[in-house]
């Protein structure tokens, strides 16, 4: 293993991990607050990527970065108010089936609108090309992905730890009945968290567009990796989603290069091993 | 006591009375009960209809309805085994297709790579492999519950799916493994051909599975599972080894699913990683919920309804997945307790007031 290999694949792993973090953060918060496993979360990511592709071709990449998350976020508001709100008192599996149905619909809609062929979102000119990192050539766009990922993580961390909204959200994860008893409009917070999680996933999808290719079925793939990250990191924590994303992203990247045959199997084995030692994930709170 | 002695008197008396007929009925039910173990006689009528089904199709020589029925029966074994876990033991698994895949790939690999299509051999190997899988996953996943359990079972199915996708030389990779031969029934040469013979093989397997699962559910073991589902802490306080019971339920569910998988591979003469995928596990859960979980027969009707809807949708629009997705959402929003729940509500409404 040359140093060049380690630098390039290490950066690839971090970039991939941060992309997954953008998905996992919403998934984790939605579970932590709403107690819903959102199987449609990969679909938000996929729709973000596809809308980003179309907007990117019609206008430009930067417009796509704004339009796709807002559009998907509004869909999130609609879904939460029209459907999910009625599910909170229902059994786990009912909620799962609802989001599973939404994922089915999204997959078919994407196939109807954009077709089944693989698409590639082009990065803006300013970010294409390569540069030197510690003596290795590396695509500029992936460095941009890492920058964006770290910036979003820092932003979320600041909101979560330093603002009133953040304290409401943390309190909501710990005990939502208590928060609503204290006079917080918990329903509005739920809608907001769900829509924000959806928008963040769509944002991740646009950012991922030039790195991962776009194809129907990418939703399932990123969802599974996202769920793994959330389980490893611990449900309901942003810190867990961040470190879990980096760990799983790096592991998947290195294993795929070194032992492509068993990469996914080993990734899941890592997850199983972590859960054996820490049943609530690395940073997990004790959730009922 | 008095009534009983009276009955004996009536029986021994040479002259027939209305009472005697009743007594005969009682002996008949105990006879039926001994052989069928409390299975409602209505199920026998249903079974008879299924046995007669291919004959009804003879005049129109319809291959499609027969293969559709075979497919439904086969998937019913899968959904019934999921109901044991989900509806009775309360184990919300979202990776049950892993076991379907284990069984299916066992049959396919034995047939294509080793030329072994003996049903008994294949089933034995499938059961052993599924048991191993169920033990490994069960020991790990049953340490958790709820969402974590759901995700661990989902991850396990993904492992199996990833493994068969990548192990090309043996499993055929993502393209799947075609060319699975029809099975020999126990003795070489007794080949179960496609069409009617395979329909009867599947029907036999489905009926036996239903019967065995029914007996398991109505045994003390099954009652304990239901107790755990309803109040786990209490059962633990009463001294039951809750995790062991769950593990056994998980194991039994996995074995039946693997048997369904064996038939699945023989039926399609093909297996691909899709069989173990996320969508397969999800639709199985939907079929169980559609029929009504914890009823055993409900999931069978759920499977019938789902597969009929899916087949008719896919025959008139290429975008059937979209409509199916909408149906899932509508179903979960408005229908509670599945088809079995609707049936119970209709029956209670039809019953005159005051009747038990």
Image (cartoon, coloured by chain):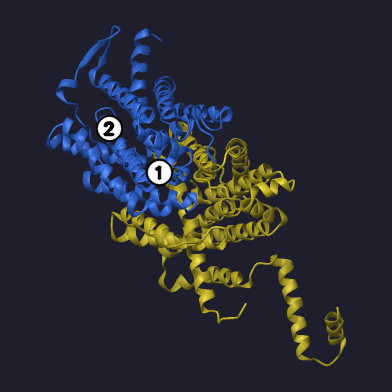
- What is the spatial separation of the Cα atoms under label 1 and label 2, in whole angstroms? 23 Å
Residue at the farthest bottom position: B15
- Name which quarter of the figure residue B251 lies in: top right
Residue A17 lies, in percent from the top left, at 37, 25
Q: Is residue A27 left or right of residue B260?
A: left
Identify residue for label 2: A213
| Residue A25: x %, y % from top left | 38, 33
- The hue used for chain A is blue
Is disc 2 placed on a helix, strand or loop?
Answer: loop
Judging from the image, mark 1 belongs to the subunit labelled A
Residue at which label 1 appears: A38
Q: Is residue A9 above or below residue B23?
A: above
Q: Is residue A99 above or below residue B305?
A: above
Kindly give the residue lying farthest to the left in the view shown. A59
Of residues B20 and B172, the one drawn nearer to the viewer in this rendering: B20
Q: Colour of chain B?
A: yellow
Q: Mark number for residue A152?
A: none
> Residue shown at 41%/20% (left/top)?
A254
Mark 1 against mark 2, which lies toward the viewer?
Answer: 1
Residue closer to the observer: B334 or B27:
B334
Label 1 Cα crowd, 10 Å radius (few <14 / some 14-19 / many 20+):
many
In the image, residue B179 lies at what x, y percent? Answer: 45, 44
Q: Earlier in the sequence, mark 1 or mark 2?
A: 1
From this view, report whether residue B216 is shown above or below residue B160: below
- Left or right of B64: which side holds A280? right
- Could you confirm whether marks 1 and 2 are on the same chain? yes
> Which part of the image, by quadrant, shows the C terminus of chain B?
bottom right
């Amino acid at each position: 293993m040359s140093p060049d290999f380690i630098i390039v694949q290490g950066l690839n792993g971090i970039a991939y991990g941060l992309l997954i973090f953008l998905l996992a953060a919403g998934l984790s918060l939605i579970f932590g607050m709403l107690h819903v496993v959102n199987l449609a979360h990969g679909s938000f990511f996929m729709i973000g990527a596809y809308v980003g592709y179309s907007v990117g071709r019609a206008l430009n990449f930067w417009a796509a970065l704004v339009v796709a998350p807002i559009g998907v976020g509004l869909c999130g508001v609609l879904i939460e108010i029209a459907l999910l709100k009625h599910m909170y008192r229902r059994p786990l599996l009912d909620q799962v089936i609802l989001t599973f149905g939404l994922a089915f619909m999204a997959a078919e809609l994407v196939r109807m609108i954009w077709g089944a062929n693989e698409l590639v979102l082009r990065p803006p000119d300013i970010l294409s090309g390569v540069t030197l990192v510690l003596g290795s050539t590396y695509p500029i766009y992936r460095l941009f992905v890492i920058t964006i990922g770290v910036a979003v993580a820092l932003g979320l961390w600041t909101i979560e730890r330093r603002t009133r909204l953040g304290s409401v959200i943390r309190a909501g994860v710990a005990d939502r009945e208590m928060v609503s008893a204290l006079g917080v409009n918990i329903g509005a917070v739920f809608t907001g968290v769900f829509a924000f999680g959806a928008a963040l996933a769509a944002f991740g999808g646009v950012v991922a567009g030039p790195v991962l290719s776009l194809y129907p079925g990418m939703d399932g793939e990123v969802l599974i990796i996202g769920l793994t990250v959330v389980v490893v990191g611990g449900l309901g924590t942003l810190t867990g989603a961040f470190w879990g994303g980096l760990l799983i992203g790096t592991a998947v990247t290195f294993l795929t290069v070194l032992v492509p045959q068993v990469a996914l199997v080993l990734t899941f084995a890592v997850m199983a091993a972590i859960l054996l030692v820490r049943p609530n994930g690395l940073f997990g709170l004790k959730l009922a | 006591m008095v009534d009983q002695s009276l009955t004996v008197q009536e029986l021994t008396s040479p002259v027939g009375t209305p009472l005697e007929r009743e007594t005969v009925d009682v002996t008949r039910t105990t006879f039926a009960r001994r052989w069928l173990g409390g299975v409602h006689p209505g199920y026998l009528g249903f079974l008879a209809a299924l046995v007669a089904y291919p004959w009804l199709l003879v005049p129109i020589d319809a291959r499609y309805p027969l293969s559709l029925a075979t497919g439904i029966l086969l998937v019913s074994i899968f959904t019934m085994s999921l109901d044991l876990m989900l509806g009775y033991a309360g184990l919300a698994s979202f990776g049950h297709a892993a076991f379907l895949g284990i069984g299916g790939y066992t049959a396919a690999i034995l047939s294509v790579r080793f030329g072994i299509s003996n049903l008994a051999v294949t089933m034995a190997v499938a059961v052993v492999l599924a048991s191993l899988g169920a033990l490994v996953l069960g020991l790990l996943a049953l340490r958790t519950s709820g969402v974590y359990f759901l995700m661990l079972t989902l991850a396990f199915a993904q492992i199996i799916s990833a493994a068969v996708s990548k192990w090309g030389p043996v499993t055929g990779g993502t393209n799947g493994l075609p060319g699975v031969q029809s099975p020999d029934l126990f003795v070489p040469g007794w080949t179960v051909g496609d069409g009617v013979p395979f329909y009867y093989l599947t029907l036999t397997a489905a009926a036996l599975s239903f019967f065995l699962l029914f007996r398991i559910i109505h045994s003390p073991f099954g009652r304990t599972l239901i107790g755990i589902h309803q109040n786990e802490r209490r059962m633990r306080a009463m001294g039951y080894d809750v995790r062991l019971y769950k593990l056994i339920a998980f194991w039994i569910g996995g074995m039946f699913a693997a048997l369904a998988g064996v038939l699945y591979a023989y039926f399609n003469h093909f297996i691909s990683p899709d069989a173990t995928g996320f969508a397969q596990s999800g639709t199985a859960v939907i079929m169980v919920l559609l029929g009504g979980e914890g009823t055993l027969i409900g999931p069978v009707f759920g499977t019938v309804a789902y597969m009929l809807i899916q087949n008719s949708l896919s025959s008139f629009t290429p975008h059937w997945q979209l409509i199916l997705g909408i149906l899932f959402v509508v179903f979960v929003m408005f229908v509670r307790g599945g088809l079995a729940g609707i049936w119970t509500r209709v029956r209670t409404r039809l019953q005159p007031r005051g009747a038990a």
